[in-house]
Amino acid sequence: MLQAIRDKTSGWIAYLIIGLISVPFALWGINSYLGGGEEQPAAVVNGNEISARDLDQAYARYRERLLQVFGGKLPDIFQDENVVKEQVLSQLIEERVLIDYIEEQGYRVGPKALFREIAKIPSFQKDGRFDKELYQAQLRSQGYSPALFELELRRQLEMKQPENGIKLSALVPAVAVDQALALQQEKRKLRLLTIPARTDSVEVSDQEIEDFYQKQSGRFMQPARVKLDYIELNLDTVKQGIDVDENALRQRYEEQREQLTTPETREARHILITVPDGADDATVEAARQKLLDLKKRIDAGEDFAALAREFSQDPGSAADGGSLGEVEKGMMVKPFEDALFALQPGQVSDLVRTQFGWHLIRLDGINPGGTQTFEEVRDRLADEIKTEKAEAQIYDLAETLANIGYEEPDSLQPAADQLGLPIRTTDWFTRSQGQGLAANEKIRQVAFSEDVLNQKRNSDLIELGENNVAIVHLNAHEPEKLKQLDEVRNQIVVLLKKQKAREQAQQTGQQLLEKIRKGELDLQQAAEQSGGELKEVGAVARDDNSIVPELRAAAFAMPKPEDGKPRFQGVAGVNGDYSIIELDQVDVDASAITDEARQNLLKKMRAEAGNYDYQAFIKALVEQAEIQRTPVKELQ
């Protein structure tokens, strides 16, 4: 269990890898290339294991992304860790069967395609261009080698190939697009009578309150809650106790001097007149003369970039005015490099001959490069060394904490004394919700376990994340109890009044609707009789927000009027009000059905159809695979 503390599979690199994969394949962990222990696997797919550690790490990344999406607080639907883990495991299984398919079908990503994708990643760019030194330094800072990162990225790109093939081949009939577009542009002319659920006139008796309290007592339970004492051990707390020797800092600086040095680069443009291989002297001279004429025009004041766009035969730079970007030594053939590095900014070279033809080179600027000083990187180097030392120590500290907690199960004090760590106490929290440390689902599960809650023993070591563990002990416990009637009386009164008002509004509305449909009343008369609000809504589109969503949905589900007679429909609102919808007319805005609208909708429908086809493809792969799956609760 503690081995996870040493695994370096988080940080921005892991999230970068996650970001390269489309849903549902958003949970792949690089740990799968690093091997696992002898623990029970979460699943075995076609003979390939998905370890419990793979699942834990995928779940942790997924949960972190959810926290970012929901502003740091997960909705109740994500609070049950086992349920969410089962979903994550399903996604890992889907990914594994896709990998098997890719290998079987021989999908490949070549070196050039791989490099193009790496070069696009902003984290590896400097001034908008890929920087090899930055690339290596960024990977090294996260404990990755380029080979391992490129292996993982290549796998992700290979996984995208069948996905793209299926999605791009999706077909949508033209008639389906026209029908969908007509429905989208449909407008419905409505009137709306709303009968409000009025609570001010509703009376509630003491007996009704008592009966509701007895019958619905489960709604008024105060859940069991606890407080915990805990010791938390993480990388930051360990780093605080580590001092870094000045000599070690100096030595690390010398070791990284090459990485901290930026070579001199030159911003340049060129004009190339190509000379074919094996060209005779006349052809060579004709090319030289053409470029010589261009040089005379440049010397006379014409714009170098404009001439490059018009005459340069280099397909990679001509459209950009001959720009080569930043060039450092070793990037160009020697005659070109010698000429370039002999120029001063603004100067244009004499004609230069290379195996590609004749060149004119203009130097636009010099970036001298240089080496960061020791003082500039001192803090970063110190943190780097502290982190390394803390990572080396935290495993042993965690093991010691676990051992003392087990040997002295009645208190955290012996562990705190021996390790010099503080004992902290949580606020009250329940099984489903907590703050601070108790916001972690694992902590809440352990808090209400038999050993901690009833036996009052120290917990086992709880892994909260990478290099972050805790051990807990019960501080206080309040069992579940029924709140007294006086505590919830006002709440019951509000509930009963709303319930009665809703029933009254619905009863009145349904009676009026029946009379309207029989022709005994029109909508205006029903409004006068009920005291409800009659609203001339007018023409409503499917995305119109002038009425609430449930009423709009009901209006667009109604049959079209026939023989000039309106349709009527009753709808009980979520707020307790009852509404009667009058549908008088259905029109389609033909002016909005344009070729552009067709193309936009076709693109959207193809994307939806492609996603559906792709999910069906993945489902078929899973159904055909040999899968042995361990219930998540058995992996705890």
Image (cartoon, rainbow, N blue to C red):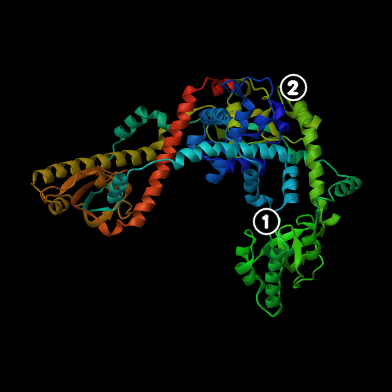
Residue type, mark 1 in image: Arg
Q: Quadrant of the N terminus?
A: top right
Looking at this view, is 53 or 535 the one in front?
53
When asked about the image quadrant of residue 95, the answer is top right
Residue type, mark 2 in image: Glu
CB contact under 8 Å: marks 2 and 1? no
Is residue 300 among the parts visible in the rendering?
yes
Looking at this view, is 596 or 515 the one in front?
596
Label 1: how many residues lie within 10 Å, few (<14), some (14-19) or many (20+)?
A: some
Residue, disc 1: 129
Where is residue 160 drawn, in percent x and y?
A: 54, 39
The secondary structure type at the circle numbered 1 is: strand
Q: Residue furthest right?
A: 247
Q: Which residue lies at the image location 45% right of the left edge and 31% below the top edge?
A: 617
Q: Is residue 68 left or right of residue 275?
A: left
Residue, disc 2: 408
